[in-house]
Structures are given as C-alpha cells and as structure tokens.
Amino acid sequence: MPGLATTEANTSAALASSVVSFDICETYASFLKNEELSAPLAAILALSKLIETSDGITPIPFFRGHVDQKIIAGTMLELVKALNDGAEGLKASTSNPISLNAGCELFIAFVTLLPHDSASFSDLKLELVRQGQKYASEALTYRDKIANLALGFIKDDSVILTHSYSRVVMKTLLRAHERKRISVYVTEARPRGLGLRTYEELTAAGIPCTVVLDSAVSYVMDKVDFVLVGSEAVVESGGLINAVGSNQIAIIAQAANIPFYALAESYKFHRLFPLSQYDLPTHTSNILSFPLSSGGNVASPPTTGAIKPLHEKFGNADYIRQMTPEQIACNPGVDYTRPDLITLVFSDVGSLTPEGVSQYVVGMFAG
C-alpha cells in the first residue's frame, strides 16, 4: 500500500535523524585534554556521557572496527551491559588500561549499588549522570586534601626523593615549599624522561632540585629523608602500581631504612591482586623477551639507530648508545611494589597503611 510505505519511510527517516552518534574512545580522549583530569576521572565522565546518550537506539563504536554496534539501554541490565562494553572498549584502546579501569570499575559499581526512588528509568539515568559529573568535580579537590595531609609528615629542611612525574606529588611538594624548606632529588625516569619535567617545574618554583640517574638511586638514598611517589593504582593487597622503577626504589629504601610514601587519590584504588610483575594487565609475552630471527635463532643487533657517534656533533671519537624504539617497546612502563615495601599511603580518605588500604578497597565495592 502506497500510504503505508510512505508512513514507514517517514518513520525510518525520523528514527535515523534522532540517532545520536557516540564514540566513547573519542569522548574519553577529549576529557583527557584537561590536564587536571586523570585517566580514572576521564573514564567516569566518558561513561556518564554514555548513559546520557543511551536513550533509544544509539550506535556506539566501543571497539574499533565495530562502529555499527547498537544498544538499547531501556533497563538496568541493558545499561550495565552497555557500561561494561564501553569500559572494555576503553581498555582495548590503550596499552596501559590500569588507571582508567580503576575509574570504570568504581563508576559501574556505583551504578549497580545506588539506592534510588526515581519515578522512571529515564529519571534514574539522569541522576546517574548528575552523580557521575558531581563526583568528578569533587574529585578534583582530592590532590589538595592529600597535599595538606602529607604536609604534616614533611619536616623543615627535608630532603626528598621522588620518581618520574606525578600531579599529586607536584601539588604536595609545591604546598610544602610554601611553608617549609625542602630539597628534592628526582629520577630521570627513562625512557620517557618525565623526571625532567618534574625538575623543570620544581626549579621554576624555586625549589632546589637535582636529577638523579635511574641507576644511581642507591647512591643517593643515604642522603634523603624519605621517598615520595605518585601512583597509577593502589591495588587490593595494598601494593602500588606506578611508573617503572618505583619497585626498585622501594626495595632500596627499605634496605636503607628510609620511609617510602605513596600518594594516591581514592579513585585509583583498584580491585586487582597481582602477586608479581607478570600478573599486571600491561604485561605481555613481548616484554623483556629475547629477540629471535625467523629461523628461531638469536637475532643480530640492529646496525642502525642504536649507536650514534658523538664525533658527528662534537668532533671526538666518543660514542653514546641509545635504545631503539623496538628495545624500549620490549620494556615495561609500570611495575608493582609489594605492600611490605610501602610505609604509608596518603589519600583523600586519610593516611593508610597498606593493610588499611586493603580493608578500604574491600569496603568500597561491598556496598
């Protein structure tokens, strides 16, 4: 029937025009452009946006190559599935999903446990979005809380060793500098060299600072009063996941009887229970593997790129050797520090022993 066909065509066109295109990975990346937002908070905001756009049928490209996947989030079961799928898409989009996954787990647990008396499911989704955005806004104050808490443990004329670059560590050191005299050693943190960023910002603020070779940590340890590091995540055992090199610093600090303090916002508390480095989600069979040729034999070293003669620049016969990108890719970016190596964890929920962190994480997800 012509009339029926016309009606069906108009209905299809109306539905097509009402569909909202949403890419959770692009949304997450856009939130990360705000330097104040860490990965867990960006993940929470991205999942909140997913809920906001989940009315009706929405194409959501959770996984690259599956851009036409469609969901109907008309019930709580469907909404939780959509959130879990979105979290999986975010994890698949990065080589280090640990920190963002902490945020995803926290938000999804909140969604499933939130008591409510909403009149409709649409009202409930609006409330979830509002609560997610409110939490992210409040969480931006956590670094200030941690800085104020840690300040009580920093004495005048303290010499501090820190590792790589951490926003909460920077906040704490700058806060301490306002009221006390401190000096800071910072590791170079190869291969990304983020310790140099820490050095530049501390020096610009007038804090005496010296860069330490990663291989010279034991050399400098006897000169410091304590170690202060940030975190990618604090896991259920009370252990720490952070920039690679943190574990060996903690081992050296314990051997020298130097306190090792970690700073961590509570949204980085993560339900992981690694027993070793090889239990981390970032570990792959390629990390620290021996290169083999196609015939199964040990591969020959690269002939270009790995060795750069200095005399080309400075007119002498000395050489500087640098790792190739392939060699760097075969190394870990983060490592795991056992809870027995950590003195205290300073968080927005208080100063906790590793055992206290473990109890808190269990309570976070117990409702």
Image (spheres, grey):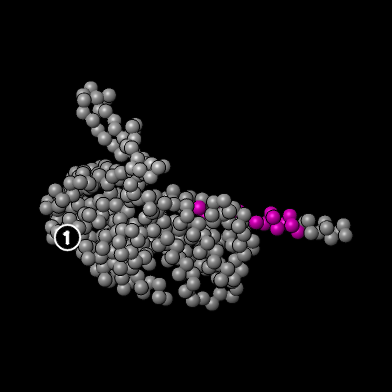
SS at badge 1:
helix
Magenta highlight range: 11-25
Q: Is residue 14 magenta?
A: yes
Disc 1 marks a residue whose amino acid type is Gln
Q: Quadrant of residue 192?
A: top left
Q: Is residue 190 visible?
A: yes
State the residue at coordinates (18%, 53%): 160
Q: Is residue 52 magenta?
A: no
Q: For this view, does 300 lie left or right of residue 228?
A: right
Q: Main secondary structure of the magenta part?
A: helix
Residue 256 x %, y %: 13, 57
Q: Nearer the viewer, residue 216 or 187?
A: 216
Q: Is residue 142 visible?
A: no
Q: Nearer the viewer, residue 243 or 115?
A: 243
Q: Nearer the viewer, residue 282 or 38?
A: 282
Q: Which residue is mark 1?
A: 254
Task: Return the residue found at the far right.
Answer: 1
Above or below: residue 317 compared with residue 65 = above
Q: Quadrant of residue 262?
A: bottom left
